[in-house]
Amino acid sequence: MTQSRQSQVSLSDTPYYHCISRCVRRAYLCGEDKYTEKSFEHRRQWVVERMHYLASLFNINICAYAIMSNHYHLVLHIDEQQNESLTDEEVCERWCQLYSKPVLVERWQSEQTTSEAENKAALTIINGWRGRLADISWFMRCLNEFIARKANKEDNCSGRFYSLPSMALTL
């Protein structure tokens, strides 16, 4: 049985991790399918653009990557110091470029909260986002889900596009 990613990540040991994500159902991530003679090479750019966009939001640096026909490799660096130095406003700004903003956080930002309990609840949500901005699982989720949706739409199908991502400690 494999270990969860959360139990594998130890920033006190290393901030560097090698992640791999593979396609399922004989799907092509990029390259040319010899059987159908269809090219999927344009998908390589999808992956490159999305991972660079996510790197601009997350506090995770891309050290190296390789995109193959049915999988990709990433070497990621978690920048814990940068993550802790973000203001609560910066965390909101980054996270809300990916997901919608709850009304409570919107009210907190416009200083319209009516109690200390509301402020505390909004800050709890924001601190959760801060943790996610330095979380490899969330980074991989945001990358894989985006690519899978585009590829499934293009392939006119639904369901899983990737197997569960794997990760190795890089010392």
Image (tube, rainbow, N blue to C red):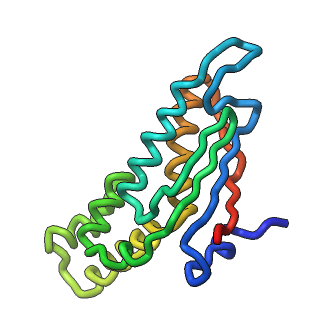
| Residue 122 x, y percent position in the rendering | 31, 75
Residue 85 placement: quadrant: bottom left
* Relative side of 25 to 130, left or right: right
| Residue 48 x, y percent position in the rendering | 47, 40
Above or below, 116 relative to 130: below
141, 170: nearer the viewer: 170
User: Going 68% across and 61% down the picture, which residue do you hit?
Assistant: 167
70, 170: nearer the viewer: 170
User: Going 54% across and 45% down the picture, which residue do you hit?
Assistant: 145
Above or below, 98 relative to 107: above
Quadrant location of the N terminus? bottom right
Q: Is residue 69 visible?
A: yes
Residue 121 placement: quadrant: bottom left
| Residue 91 x, y percent position in the rendering | 31, 68
Residue reaching furthest to the bottom: 116
Above or below, 76 relative to 156: below
Above or below, 161 relative to 94: above
Quadrant location of the C terminus? bottom right
User: Going 26% across and 81% down the picture, which residue do you hit?
Assistant: 119
